[in-house]
Structures are given as C-alpha cells and as structure tokens.
Image (spheres, rainbow, N blue to C red):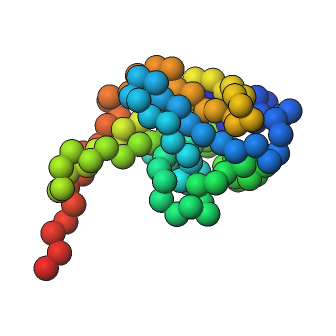
Amino acid sequence: MNIKTVLDELKFADETAQMVCLIPSAGIRSRIYVVGQVLENMPGVVLGDREPHLREKTVGIFREELTTFGAQFAENDFLMESTHEIDEKIYELRYYKLTHIEIEAGEVVLYSQKGELQELRETHHELECE
C-alpha cells in the first residue's frame, strides 16, 4: 500500500479517531511512535510506546504528516518498523508492509497481514559507554 492509497482509505475517517497498528503474525499491537522515512525512500511508521505525546496519533495528524512526503516516496510501500530486543546488547529492526486499513471500535487500525520482510531486517549492537 502506498501513501496515496493510505490517504484515499482515510478520506472519510473521523479526524479525531486514534491510530493503532496490528501485526498478527508477530503478535504486535502498538501505537505509532513516529511517522517518517524508515528506510531510504521508504515511508512508514516506527512502532512503540515511547513519548506519550508523540504516540497518540489521530487520523487528522497522521494524514497531515503523510502529505509532507515528497514524490520519491509516492510509489513505494508503506512500512511498519518494530524494534525487537535480542538481549541487553543486541536489537533488531524488523519491517512489515501495510496491507490494509480498518476501523474497529472507534480506532483506525493499520494492518500488516503478511509476515516480516526478512530481507530488510537489521541487526544492531548497542555501543558500550564507559
């Protein structure tokens, strides 16, 4: 699903409805931490419960943020990025493609019905500070 399709899907949604992301294959239900470029020229959302004032996205704010993306993002898939801690020093960034949008119990739900895009997975090691 690309940005134009996402905006079309949200055209008639309530501006004040809260946004949530659901990835059943990974057991993830999360608020949106931030909207932005998750990979080079790939628009998406970073999932997480950090910064309470940032994760309370409404449809109106979300649509506004989507309109800031340039033409180079127009045809690319919209992704969801999730951080998975492996241990105290290693974490992975995993990516899921947005497949469809539904309105459930007054919330707008961004779904990824497919599994992880494993070819995009990134493994990171946290730097040790002394």
Outermost residue on the right side: it is 12
Name the residue nearer the viewer: 38 or 17: 17
Residue 2's x, y, as percent? Answer: 64, 31
Horizontal placement of 124 versus 1: left or right? left
Q: 79 left or right of 57?
A: left
Q: In the image shown, does 120 or 62 lie closer to the viewer?
A: 62
Taking depth in this image into account, of 75 and 12 the one nearest to the observer is 12
Screen quadrant of the N terminus: top right
Can residue 50 be seen here?
yes
Q: Residue at x 41, y 29 (%)?
A: 27
Number of numbered discs on residues = 0
24 relative to 56, above or below? above
Question: Is residue 126 rendered to the left or right of residue 110?
Answer: left
Q: In this view, does 13 lie above or below 40?
A: above
* Residue 122 in the image, given as x and y percentages of width and height: 29, 43
Quarter of the rendering containing residue 77:
top right
Quadrant of the rendering where the C terminus is positioned: bottom left
